Image: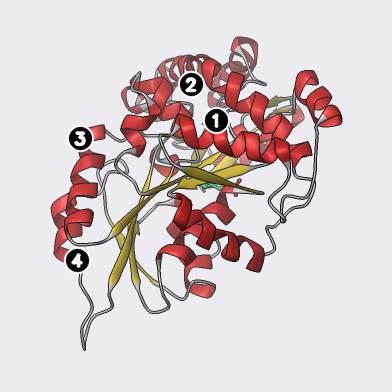
Amino acid sequence: MVHDFRSDTVTRPSPAMRRAMAEAVVDDDVLGHDPTTLELEREGAALLGKESALFMPSGVMCNLVAICTHTRPGDEVITEEWAHTSRFETGGAGAVAHVLLRTLRSKRGLMDADEIGRWISGGNEHTPKTALVCVEQTHNFHGGALLPIDGLRAIADVARSRGVAVHMDGARIWNAVAASGVDAKEHTAHADTVSFCLSKGLGAPVGSLLCGPAEFLERARFWRKRLGGGMRQSGILAAAGLIALREGRHRLADDHRLAKRFATSLADIGPYVVDPDVVDTNIVFFDTGTIEAARIVEAAQARNVLLYAVGPRRMRIVTHHDVGDESVDVLLELLTALAR
Ligand SMILES: Cc1ncc(COP(=O)(O)O)c(C=O)c1O
């Protein structure tokens, strides 16, 4: 058995998903007629309290299409310094949307609304026009941090009062819902558009949705097509996405419990350094102290444990539906043995 903690993107589609994919009713989604894709888009949009949604192959594409649609070349986008949109999307915002990214520091992923306000510019002879603020809920590289709703509201209030749109990279919005116990709509009310992934904790093999106003998504279709994201019989993928959306979100609390259990146990094992109190959801970052992270990855692989080093002495583990208590036991035993 393989114990795979590299990411929540590694989950395999369930037998029910594979059956649904085989039986999916399909048509051509570029023409707007694939019934299963349309069903998924309707359900996803409704759950987030948005008018409409657009199915795409990936979270990166949803974010890029959102940025392209919200902005014009030369505009500025305010985002967090470790946000997926600024650090981990190959510079697409610059290369494709031709926008400048103004990256701000944050407290565990939450940027300061007043600081955002100080940077926003209507554009003039000297400064670029600020067109968009991007927030990330939950925040991956701040350890799956849950951003407080008040903080999201403060950012949206500042942005909207200055005519600037807000996009939420909600790749793991359902983890935020599970961790906060607060309905998705209360998180997403503070963003004009929201992207979320079906292929992370929810367990689908492929796919993400960009949700927002119908008029915005009509324009976003242009960018999806331009980027090559128009899919034909996408109902095959949407069928798995529907199961992920209907069922996958209800089991995320298990992943959070497991991540917390791992961090709490690891805190007692030297030389590792971890703070279990900041584990809000399914992601744990920890320092490996005197042990090189690459050595841990190598030793783990020999025991069928797959891990991800994010720095020379820093690692990230992610829990999901294909790892359970037994996998965490194996991982803790391994880390204990390496520490000796
Ligand atoms: C916060 C966040 N946004 C967006 C993405 C992009 O998702 P994908 O890899 O499906 O394009 C990821 C992927 O890990 C992510 O963690």
Residues at badges 4 and 2 in contact (C-beta under 8 Å)?
no
Element type where label 1 sits in the image: strand
Residues at badges 1 and 2 in contact (C-beta under 8 Å)?
yes
Q: Earlier in the sequence, mark 1 or mark 2?
A: 2
Three-letter code, disc 1: Val
Q: Which residue is mark 2?
A: 259
Q: CA distance from mark 2 to mark 3?
A: 25 Å
Residue 119: assigned label: 4
Question: Are there few (<14), some (14-19), or many (20+) residues within 10 Å of tag 2?
Answer: many
Q: Which residue is mark 1?
A: 318
Q: Which residue is mark 3?
A: 150
Residue 45: assigned label: none
Q: Earlier in the sequence, mark 4 or mark 2?
A: 4
Element type where label 2 sits in the image: helix
In the image, taking residue 333 as reference, residue 290 lies left or right, namely left
Work out whether residue 298 can be spotted. Answer: yes
Above-or-below relation of 56 to 1: below
Nearest the viewer among 59 and 185 is 185
Three-letter code, disc 3: Asp
* Front: mark 2 or 3: 3
In the image, taking residue 96 as reference, residue 50 lies left or right, namely left
Which x, y percent locates residue 326?
64, 10
Three-letter code, disc 2: Ala
Residue under the point 59% across and 27% down: 245
Which x, y percent locates residue 27?
80, 45
Element type where label 4 sits in the image: helix
Nearest the viewer among 43 and 289 is 43
Residue under the point 20% across and 71% down: 121
Question: Are there few (<14), some (14-19), or many (20+) residues within 10 Å of tag 3?
Answer: few
Q: Earlier in the sequence, mark 3 or mark 1?
A: 3
* Front: mark 3 or 1: 3
Q: Work out which quarter of the rendered image holds the C terminus and state it.
A: top right
